[in-house]
Amino acid sequence: MLSTLMSTHQDITQLLLRATDGEQRAVDVLLPAVYDELRQIADRCLRRERADHTLQTTALVHEAYLKLIDQRQVHWQNRAHFFAIAAQAMRRILVNHAKGVNRLKRGGNRDRVPLDDAVAFTPDQDIDLVALDEAMQRLAAFDPRKSKLVELRFFGGMSVEESAEVLGIAPATVKRDWNFAKAWLLREITKGDCATETN
């Protein structure tokens, strides 16, 4: 099983490298090879959305995949790098979607994202997706690695070990950064909620 998994990871990495070099056959084979994992990432992202969300899993996967394949400047390092960028693309798609819906509502209710137990800032708490994105941008301004880690774990659903591989740091550092980032983002988002309630 492990050798099959390693072979699959190596195969995907090879396909990514060949696709980066412009080989159309690799591009054609890549989507079926990564589709299930992209669906899992999309499912995790959309599970946190409200029940009547208009963006469906398949649409999110396809839109993200088109953005990924269209990035000719990216030199894919490996499959973990690909899925990290996929999580980033899905985050941007969902945030842009939420902003578009909010514009239509003229500042109405923002999309609330429930945080599950695996990556919760606090149990059973809903987080405003646009507010989370804005807080992540502020975090990235002074600590890009911690912001990237939130993207990998929260949006990408990556484990501590997978995140460590993508970021090139030790799992213990991932755990410390994750604890800091969760607390910092919760404070920032809560601060924003308090300011809104007082107005």
Image: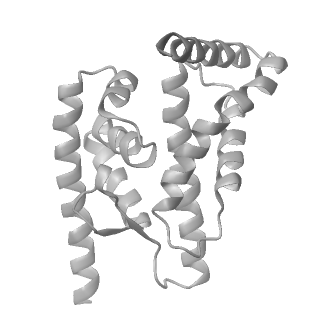
Would residue 59 appear left or right of 184 to someone viewing this image? Answer: right
Q: Is residue 156 above or below residue 162?
A: below
Q: Residue at x 65, y 70 (%)?
A: 54
Q: Is residue 65 left or right of residue 150?
A: right
Name the one closer to the observer, 101 or 36. 36
Tell me the residue at 55%/28% (across/down).
Answer: 82
Instruction: State left or right for residue 187 relative to residue 50.
Output: left
- Rendered location of residue 24, percent (x, y): 83, 20
Q: Position of residue 16 (x, y in %)?
A: 65, 19
Query: From the viewer's perspective, is residue 124 above or below residue 85?
Result: below
- Furthest residue to the front? 1
| 99, above or below 90, in the image | below
Q: Percent x, y for residue 35?
A: 67, 37
Q: Residue at x 64, y 25 (%)?
A: 73
Q: Report how many numbered discs are placed on residues in the image.
A: 0
| Residue 19 in which image quadrant | top right
Q: Nearer the viewer, residue 131 or 157?
A: 157
Quadrant of the rendered image containing residue 64: top right
Colour approach in the figure: one colour
Q: Residue furthest bottom?
A: 199
Specify the quadrant that holds the C terminus.
bottom left
- From the top left corner, tell me how far across and down residue 123 is, in percent: 23, 63
